[in-house]
Image: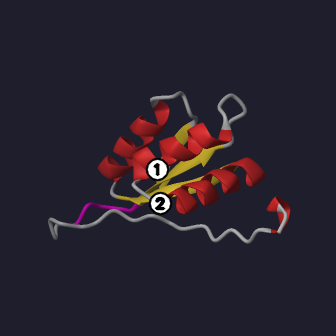
Amino acid sequence: MTPSARTVHLPVIHENQTTGVSTGEPHHVILYNDDHHAFDVVVRQVQKATGVSTDEAFAITFCAHASGRAVCYAGAHAACEHVADILREIALQVEVDRA
């Protein structure tokens, strides 16, 4: 199977709620396409930030590469900011927005 024929199912990653307290309006982290890092470096950083599997991180990174942006995490605003900060550690361009 060629890489272009591969079906990619994009997950939306939600944080685990452990407090039972409402966290306000849901937010998401948007990862933008990056032309400055190797693809595998971005995949590893997405894994580090979100805790997803290699396959899920690949799918998120591929979506950002192919369409220019991808939602890589969804949850409370504070959790999204934390994920975004980890992605920014290597200067990836991300945005936190209301879902």
| Residue 24 falls inside the magenta stretch | yes
Residue 96 is tagged as none
From the image, which quarter does the N terminus lie in?
bottom right
In the image: residue 8, left or right of residue 82 = right
When the figure is inspected, residue 7 is found, relative to residue 93, above or below; the finding is: below
When the figure is inspected, residue 35 is found, relative to residue 75, above or below; the finding is: above
- At 62% from the left and 60% from the top, the residue drawn is 59
Counting other residues with Cα less than 10 Å from the Cα at mark 1, is it few (<14), some (14-19), or many (20 or more)? many
The magenta segment: 22-26
Residue 47 is tagged as 1
Report the number of numbered marks. Answer: 2
Using the numbered discs, state the Cα–Cα distance from disc 2 to disc 1 in whole angstroms.
Answer: 7 Å
Residue under label 2: 53
Q: Position of residue 8 (x, y in %)?
A: 68, 68
- At 56% from the left and 56% from the top, the residue drawn is 71
Q: Position of residue 4 (x, y in %)?
A: 84, 62
> Amino acid under label 1?
Gln
Relative depth, front residue between 60 and 85: 60
Callout 1 secondary element:
helix
- At 44% from the left and 59% from the top, the residue drawn is 52
SS assignment for the magenta stretch, majority = loop
Q: Quick check: marks 2 and 1 in contact, CB under 8 Å? A: yes
